[in-house]
Amino acid sequence: MTTRTDTAGTAEGPSRRRLLAGAAGAGLAVAAGVQQGARAADLPPLGTYDVVVIGSGAAGMTAALTAARQGLSCVVVEKAPTFGGSAARSGAGIWVPNNSVILAAGVPDTPAKAAAYLAAVVGPEVPADRQRAFLTHGPAAISFVMANSPLRFRWMEGYSDYYPELPGGLPNGRSIEPDQFDGNLLGAELAHLNPPYMDVPAGMVVFSADYKWVALAAVNARGAAVAAQCLARGVKAATLGQKPLTMGQALAAGLRAGLRSAGVPVWLNTPLTDLHVENGTVTGAVVTRDGAPGLVRARRGVIVGSGGFEHNAAMRKRFQRQPIGTEWTVGAKENTGDGIRAGERLGAALDLMEDAWWGPAIPIPGRPYFCLAERTLPGGLLVNGSGRRFVNEAAPYSDVVHTMYDVHDTDPAIPCWLVVDQNYRNRYLFKDVLPTLPFPDSWYDSGAAHKEWTLDALAASIGVPAAALRTSVNRFNAQARQGEDPDFHRGDSAYDHYYTDPSVHPNPCL
């Protein structure tokens, strides 16, 4: 049995390789922006605020909340008919060292450990002053959000830092996630919350940290206990008349509730058209509101928090490695790079455009599935188009896709295939398909999944060399029996062990 794995990327950011190519047109871009601004001044006025924020994701709403609590008037303009963006769709894990939540939980973090770890991970690519700014102000940001909204957080105990073996790394993790939030606090505004990427099972209240155990509920006592706890939370919430939200839904809803209390309006269905420039300074935003263009002015500044460009095929082709496609991403569909392009038209420098917050994805019908636990659980391996393993399947998801691209030119790995057997399917949840149950017929009809009785038949079905697939599986099985993976070191890192089955020995990753 196998599932095809492509890449899901929420694109953020810009490319050094593109900077010189774009620099020649920067002067023209600035001139075009000023001319655009001159015309924009004749548009219907939509109001004047101290701060105009573009985008109602976690970044935009936090910026607006900060401005409002500093006594500034603020408005948030949002392209979508919903608020929350990709944040609302996410698991909402947040990595901010030394925040009050983890310190209260007894996490042995210190500024020195955090600084050593961050420097080891990002290296000289990120200036030291920027690293210090993040470490200094990040904990204060978490405390500020809790003090100025009903949002609360909980430690994701056991969710390791991605590279815990590096100096300052913590195997038990620093990540936090939103605590349970009652959607009733938003009133009618709850109807405008962007839906989650994947629904929580009906009647249950599930946190991100629960999923590793829920996936094991059929074969692990703690997994069964956690599943029962999730159900008990759901029953309690129903008894109290609550509308329980967790993960990205809680994050977005909690921030929106904070904006309501601070009197910050959020204009939905209001896309950014351009930034308004006067005398070389951005003084507002041209937007489309109620189907017509208008100008909203900003006395102090415009904050662009409008997300990435993962749904803009032209930008992905321009900036990112091939093969790439908009159909593989799980980011908010409105993320088409509007804010990035508006800045570029004014001559703003771009960087990091070639990269993204990657994850291996299975292109099942309707929308891709971001593959987390499934590729890490014991009894599965990834093979490329040549039928060979090429990566540590349990590595951080972004690293797995980086490897897919790195090897693709010489040994195609997009798509690759996650190969598992029926024993695996009898034990573990796969997406939302319970153990022992068959995958939906539509997965097979679309070519996202294949099943055969033999490895040779499976190889023929997915178009890889049969001998290579047999060799890969036999070698993997032999190493798994020894509890080691000298080829790709799966299981060497504490991070590798997060989504694993502790009942499997000698190495629960294999």
Image (cartoon, rainbow, N blue to C red):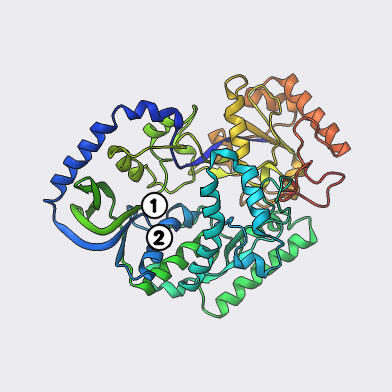
Does the rendering let one see residue 365? yes
Q: Nearer the viewer, residue 311 or 319?
A: 319
Mark 1 vs mark 2, CA separation in Å: 9 Å
Q: Nearer the viewer, residue 35 or 45?
A: 35
Quadrant housing residue 62: bottom left
Across and down, in percent, residue 502 comes to 81, 52
- 407 on left or right of 314: right
Q: Earlier in the sequence, mark 1 or mark 2?
A: 2
The residue where tag 1 is placed is: 305
Across and down, in percent, residue 501 comes to 78, 50
Quadrant housing residue 362: top right
Across and down, in percent, residue 484 comes to 83, 37
Image quadrant occupied by the C terminus: top right
Q: Nearer the viewer, residue 440 or 506?
A: 506
Q: Indicate whether 101 appears above or below 389.
A: below
- 53 on left or right of 257: left
Q: Amino acid at mark 1?
A: Gly
Q: Amino acid at mark 2?
A: Ala
Q: Indicate whether 468 appears above or below 438.
A: above
Across and down, in percent, residue 204 comes to 60, 66
Q: Indicate whether 23 appears above or below 234.
A: above
Residue plotted at (55% across, 70% down)? 152
Q: Nearer the viewer, residue 134 or 244?
A: 134
Task: Tally the marks.
Answer: 2
Q: Label 2, secondary structure: give it.
A: helix
Residue plotted at (75% across, 44% down)? 493
Q: Are marks 1 and 2 in contact (CB under 8 Å)?
A: yes
The residue where tag 2 is placed is: 63
Residue neighbourhood size for the residue with mark 2, other residues' Cα within 10 Å, grouped as few (<14), some (14–19), many (≥20): many
